[in-house]
Amino acid sequence: MIRYIRRAAAFCLLLLLALLANAARVQVFEADELTANPANRRNTIARYDQPRGDILVHTGSGDATATVTGSTDTGEQLAWERTYLHGPLYAPVTGYASQTYGTTLIENAEDDILSGTSSLLAPLPLWNDLTRGRQPGGDVVTTVRDAVQRAAYEGLAGRKGAVAALEPSTGKVLALVSSPSYDPERLSGTGSAVTDAWTRLNASESRPMLNRAIRQTYPPGSAFKIVTAAAALDAGVVDDPDEETDTPSPYVLPGTSTVLPNESSGCEKASLAEAIRVSCNTVMAHLGVEVGLDGMVEAAGDFGFNDDGLRIPSGVAKSNFDTEMSDDQLAQSSIGQFDTTATPLQMAMVAAAVANDGEIARPHLVDRTTKHDGDTVSQTSTRSYRRAMSPSTAVQLRRMMVDVVENGTGTNAAIDGVTVGGKTGTAQNGVDNSGAPYAWFICWAQSEGAGRPEVAVAVVVEDAAADRADISGGGSAAPIARAVMEAALEQE
């Protein structure tokens, strides 16, 4: 009898061990798979069971900040919905956090901090992994300055376009504006109102949800001539920017019978400095061909073109400079046409490189992240991104860009008592240039007594009411850039 009891006990023990093993398998080895299963709503319910952390911007001088997001308790099963203060103004920075459509931009890139799941917020190492819990949502402090953002947004005034502003020495993004914009709060919750808003926004011809500052590329037109000038100086194709070049007039694109026009007069054999001041197409196209394809590809790459891995922390669209071209295509590419395209952020980086002695600081939009109580858990440090040109070339280009603002096509960007360097650009658009041109202005500004330029800006206006003359960039985009620079310098 005892023998049978022992066998039964052993069998029960075996079943118990099997049960424990299965429980361990489910809870340890299959836990992640079960957690990620779309049919499991517990994570979704838990995600919205507490307020989301906030996104903040800088206000005034010093370290003063203000929140541009919030959360509201709906009383529903998915309790807390995201709210946005001045939603359209900051949509290109925050993105949206939607219970229906997920997250974008900073709401996506910093979701673990904002939702409270980041291990950085836990009281002990591995605490969140062991407990599968979450902490109160942390906050994300951006590098954006409210006054600079507003100046850019109000300057565009609803016109299609974008503005990117950087602090050249650190890479901090001071403003990131895309227009027309939208209110991300309309996408926060669930139900027909949200899905109807999503449908309308995506169907709109103006594409308000497109982040034109970092996700849209445009032909940069004559603003790209700064890159070509840097390449020519660094390659030794031009030794003295004030000496005449051997550019003929008319200039026929190599291997073709096509004459490249100038909107400005007096470009025959013009010096590099004069070509930048009045924006001679022929001189800059000719110099690009003299630098050669390999040299131009390398120079463009040094500025960040053809980099598909840039993040700020959201991904940035790749700016393009073709790596295989004929000489006539290279000539057009060297003046920012043909297949050359750039984001506004990329062109702000071009201006920042000139302002920062040829060095591009890695652009970043997040200054620091904090716990709910304000304790900092991570800080973004200044890091080098690329060396775009030699320091001596940057000095020469700064002088030439100042001449553009003081005596050339960019006079609308001048600020009393401030050293401003700029470059206008008008990029042709559409089949046979039938579309409205894109008006560009890139620039930097240094206040009196400052040791270095404090801000670099790029502005593009898509629907500029301008002719195809290069000066239209100065007419349409330069006043916006001036307002942005003024706002940045007032906060120094």
Image: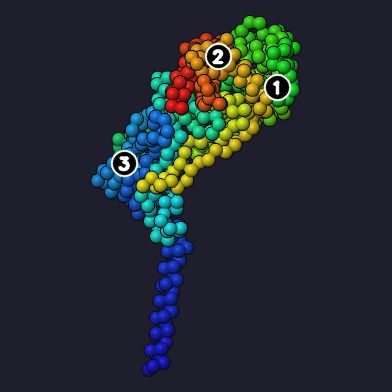
Residue 71, disc: 3
Query: What label does residue 253 carry, if any?
Result: none
Corner quadrant of residue 360 = top right
In the image, taking residue 250 as reference, residue 99 lies left or right, namely: left
Residue at 41%, 45% in the rendered image: 370
Estimate the x, y position of residue 131 in percent, counting from the top left.
Answer: 39, 60
Expressed as whole percent of the image width and height from the top left, the position of residue 259 reads 68, 10
Q: Quadrant of the N terminus?
A: bottom left
Q: Earlier in the sequence, mark 1 or mark 3?
A: 3
Whole-Å distance between the Cαs marked 1 and 3? 53 Å
Packing grade of label 3 (10 A; few <14, some 14-19, many >=20) is: some
Kind of residue indicated by mark 2:
Val
Please tell me the numbered disc located at residue 405. Answer: 2
Residue 474 location in percent, x, y?
52, 13
Residue 232 image label? 1
- Badge 3 amino acid: Ser
Q: Secondary structure at mark 1?
A: helix
Earlier in the chain: of badge 2 and badge 3, it is 3
